[in-house]
Amino acid sequence: MNVTSLFRTLALAWAAVFAGPPALELHAQQQRASTELPTDAPLQVASSIRLPSGVHVRPARKIAPDGPSAVLWARGARNVVIDLGSARLVGAGRELPADRLEGAAIHLEDCENVSVRGGSIEGYKFGIVAVGCRGVRVEGVRFDHLFRERLLSTALAADDDDQLSRESNDQGEWLERYGAAIAVRECTAAVVTGCRVRHAQNGLVLSRCSGALAYGNDFSFLSGWGIALFRSSDNKLVRNRCDACVRGFVHNVYARELGAAGILLTERCSDNLIAENLARGCGDGLSLYGGLDLVEGRAAARGELAPGGCDRNLILRNDFSAALDCGIELGFSRENRVLENVADDCLGCGVRASFCEGAIVAENSFCGAAQYGVSIAHGQESWLARNVLERCGAGLEFTFDAGSHHIAGAFGRSRDSASRDHWVWNNAFAGNAADLRIRSTTGLRFRDNAYEPRESELLLTNLTLAPGEAGDAQPRELLRGVGGFLPSGSVVDSSVRAAPEDPPKEFTELDRAPAFELPGEPWKSAPQFELARVRVGEWGPWDLDSDESGPPLRPVGGALAGCVWDVAWISWKDGVDPRAVGPAEWRESVRAGAQQRAELSGLNDPWGNLERVRASVGETHFGLVATARVKLAAGRYRLRVTSDDGFRVRIGQRRVSEDWTWHPVKVRETLLELEAGEHEFTVDYFQVDGGAALALDLLQR
């Protein structure tokens, strides 16, 4: 593994950058005191302008018949300032649903040293778009009420249709589908600083960019990504706040990342600096994925001999705590450094690395992870040193899955997929359900780790010395830490080596942060973050910094919301199992022996949200039959049923959806073509034990 020379080169480059970025040389013409915006056409900017104060309601209009839409635009401009001052650009009012917002407030193309500063932008799909520019600077702009998708997840269950596509963006799918406050494409040396985004899906998207610097921005409480990079290398993301970029969460009910992330790097984003950012309570705090060029062999098919992933990035002193999945997720990449970060209390893992080589993970805090503090699958030659792994489901996992399709696929044909040769040095383990969960990993080295001073419960199955390892030491003894204590947990089908007294220089030269100064100020004043306070409605998360009330969750029902359901309940604890009788017999038995009846304005709870029903039929072994009549317009509909356990739905005499089984909570979708008029819906339901859920949504397509 030759990482030393690579990082020496990178450290020298960073030192030069942070010696002080060159000031923008804006030899702009004297700005006019006031530049009025036309009402019927976009304004082309050729020299510096300043907008007058006040609210400017201007929808985006076509720059050219086949071109993009904007309010202000520039092509080929040089050394120009667009000063929004205290002006407020509004494309559409808040009465227009956010998924119908269109166009951009400002569009820049082939420009150099153009600066956009001040003001606020709202009511567009994009705030500012820059394409093919050099030295663009966006400073102190506030963005609000921008494009975002309407979420289909409800208070009962996450909806898979809310899943974001992180991987495919070569045709510009991200911006086309999801929009962004600031979209920067094919640009060099862009600077984004002091900006704030709220009530949007994405904050900053860098696509095929290099030399960009984003610092001191607040891209929080978004329903997608705070900052996203695609095929973008040699950039610096420093001291930004990207808290609660989340879309699949209801406290104490479900937590699904659904593709949301505070910071996202996808497809060959290498040599980037990600330092001192906040991304707490996100789907993933930081997600880094090597990309389809490598994983699916697309680059090899084009003749590339050694395609890379997202490699040699420095992830330094960030706070990625309280992630719904992973604080830090690394995939299909090499030689990334994860230094001095905090990723505590994540609902998945503190850090998860899959198919990664040469990762250096040092001096981080990964405490309180529900699954693993550190999980490394199919990794090689990782260096884990001086990390704190406390209160986790398991502190450390190394594993190899022979059934992974990547082994036999394009990635496995070009890269090593084994789990091998990891170093675990001077880490602190305490209060974990298990310190280690290791399977099918060879050549492990453990040294000077601190375990709790107690009799350890360590299960060893087929633990051996690695091939070629000299000496007569027992493999078990090589796992002992400070004071001679052993870790808890299990090690299966693996091998170990003796570790030297001093750590190898190839690691110690890289596991300390380089010495350089970062631009901007740390987020010392950021409020304490509590995941339990996060609320996600149908348009995304609530801004915890504001006084606004929490957003309403999408009401369950859709076209069925508000219709009257005639419901009868029965306990079958001492009767016949509903799975043993036919539909007609079940309905007849419920109606004839009903213990409770009620008329409900919605069907979103197995007990109808009525305590008397729950007390009467109990928590298990009960069922219901519900009937409602509703007038519908002709058209195509999606019927979505959330259930735990069995259900059947009929419209008239036609059975349209069914899962009459004992199962965990799941969402079943059926496409329907319905005629105009009144339709009778009948729902049969039974509950066995465990969790219980029943909700119907009818959504017009």
Image: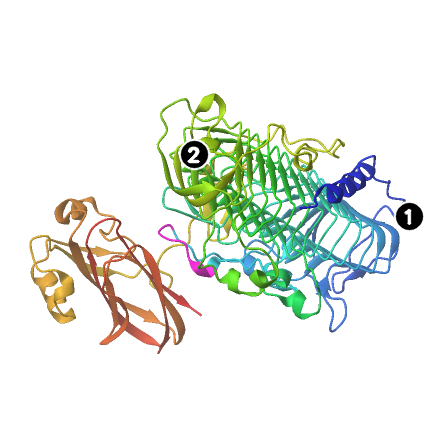
- 165 is within the stretch colored magenta: no
Q: Identity of the amino acid at label 1?
A: Ala
Quadrant position of the C terminus in the picture:
bottom left
Secondary structure of the residue carrying tag 1 is loop
Mark 1 surroundings: few (<14), some (14-19) or many (≥20) residues within 10 A: some
Q: Nearer the viewer, residue 694 or 576?
A: 576
Give the residues drawn in magenta, as a range.
Answer: 155-161
Disc 1/disc 2 C-alpha distance (Å): 71 Å
Residue 476 image label: 2
Q: Residue at x 63, y 31 (%)?
A: 503
Q: Position of residue 473 (x, y in %)?
A: 47, 33
Mark 2 surroundings: few (<14), some (14-19) or many (≥20) residues within 10 A: some
Q: Is residue 41 left or right of residue 415?
A: right
Q: Position of residue 139 (x, y in %)?
A: 75, 43
Q: Which residue is mark 1?
A: 28
For residue 332, what is the image quadrant?
bottom right
Q: Which comes before the other along the chain, label 1 or label 2?
A: 1
**Is residue 534 visible from the viewing direction of this image?**
no
Q: Main secondary structure of the magenta part?
A: loop
**Is residue 647 visible from the viewing direction of this image?**
yes
Q: Is residue 681 above or below residue 488?
A: below
Secondary structure of the residue carrying tag 2 is helix
Q: Is residue 159 left or right of residue 580?
A: right
Q: Is residue 591 left or right of residue 366?
A: left
Q: Is residue 320 above or below residue 62?
A: above
Q: Identity of the amino acid at label 2?
A: Arg
Q: Position of residue 580 (x, y in %)?
A: 12, 65
- 159 is within the stretch colored magenta: yes
